[in-house]
Amino acid sequence: MRALQYRTIGAAPEIVEIETPEPGPGEVRIRVTAAGACHSDSFIMGLNEEQYIYGLPLTLGHEGAGIVDKLGEGVTGVEVGEAVAVYGPQGCGRCVQCAQGKENYCERAAELGIRPPGLGAPGAMAEYLVVPDARFLLPLGDLDPVEHVALTDAGLTPYHAIKMSLPKLVPGTTAVVIGAGGLGHVAIQLLRALSPATVVALDVSQDKLRLATEVGAHHVFPSDAEAAERVKELTGGRGAAAVFDFVAIQPTIDAGHAMLAVEGDQVLVGVGAGAVPAGLLAAPYDSTVRAPYWGSRAELFEVFELARAGLVKIETERFSLDEAPEAYRRLHEGTLRGRAVVVP
């Protein structure tokens, strides 16, 4: 089969011909119908040799959807021909977190060497994908795989981040989304669907700010040195009840901290990192800083229901498997309007 693989540290991913995988006992093979490209992929391909821990060659793609093609011995719960989406943050299935469907927070995944598809295990940027357990396959039903595959990360990740802050997003409050790209434009829709808060979007790109307005942001501002002051002015000095940072580099972390309200949530969703001032005199009273990761299986069911209700839609650009390296080039350059979806 053909697949998109990251094969050499620092080089672009390549289309290669590899052996079609066969499902072992308990495993399920799907014929891939759609795979999403994500900034996480770009991030790991930007790591140097010392930092890179994901194995080579690596078939990319942690957002996947397909048709069940072949069942391994003993598999129940899915049928050949069923349209499914792949739940990415896979865990051991036996710890306390996994028992709650929170496999994104599996207590034993690192110890057991369990990696998500495309982030250590073979991913969905290929004609076929073997999934280790049927529980990682959620029925797509009538949802178009190309239009909705990115919900498995670009929908689930902001949904999980926002859901934990909903008690603070009461009428009269403001929520800020920093970075209105692949995940951020979905976060704006989720905030509009799930809360009465005023939604403000910040980005360095005018195209992304236009997209933010189209998907429901009440206000959009450039993400610059004046952004925090603009949010403070808009809120009468109170600040934002929640700031969802889909960039999470030091300048955006500093801006989010500066615009946070008393009891506000600063939620760092992006794959960047930085320092946040902490302590009674260094931050707004009773404010919190969180760094959530992906989301639970149950939450992915909920995201699919929001899509079926027409409350969330992902802006997508479609690429063939041959065009997948170009999709990643544009992702790295920041010229994609929403999410890139590869159709093998």
Image (cartoon, grey):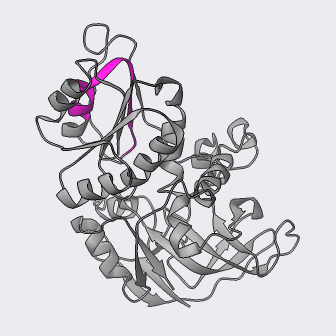
| 53, 226: nearer the viewer | 226
- Rendered location of residue 329, percent (x, y): 27, 74
* Quadrant for the N terminus in the image: bottom right
Residue extent of the magenta highlight: 253-269
Q: Is residue 165 left or right of residue 241?
A: right
| 338, 250: nearer the viewer | 338
Q: Is residue 54 above or below residue 5?
A: above
Going 53% across and 39% down the picture, which residue do you hit?
Answer: 194
Going 26% across and 26% down the picture, which residue do you hit?
Answer: 257
Q: Is residue 63 visible?
A: no
Residue 307 placement: quadrant: bottom right
| 342, 52: nearer the viewer | 342
- Rendered location of residue 224, percent (x, y): 13, 41
Q: Is residue 219 left or right of residue 110?
A: left
Residue lying at the far top in this picture: please name it: 280
Q: Is residue 79 left or right of residue 166?
A: right
- Rendered location of residue 31, percent (x, y): 65, 82
Residue 268 placement: quadrant: top left
Residue 132 placement: quadrant: bottom right
Quick check: is 337 in the magenta stretch? Answer: no
Residue lying at the far left in this picture: please name it: 225
Quick check: is 254 in the magenta stretch? Answer: yes
- Rendered location of residue 115, percent (x, y): 56, 58
How many marks on residues? 0
Q: Is residue 341 above or below residue 185?
A: below
Going 87% across and 67% down the picture, which residue do you hit?
Answer: 76
Q: Is residue 261 visible?
A: yes
Q: Is residue 228 above or below residue 329?
A: above
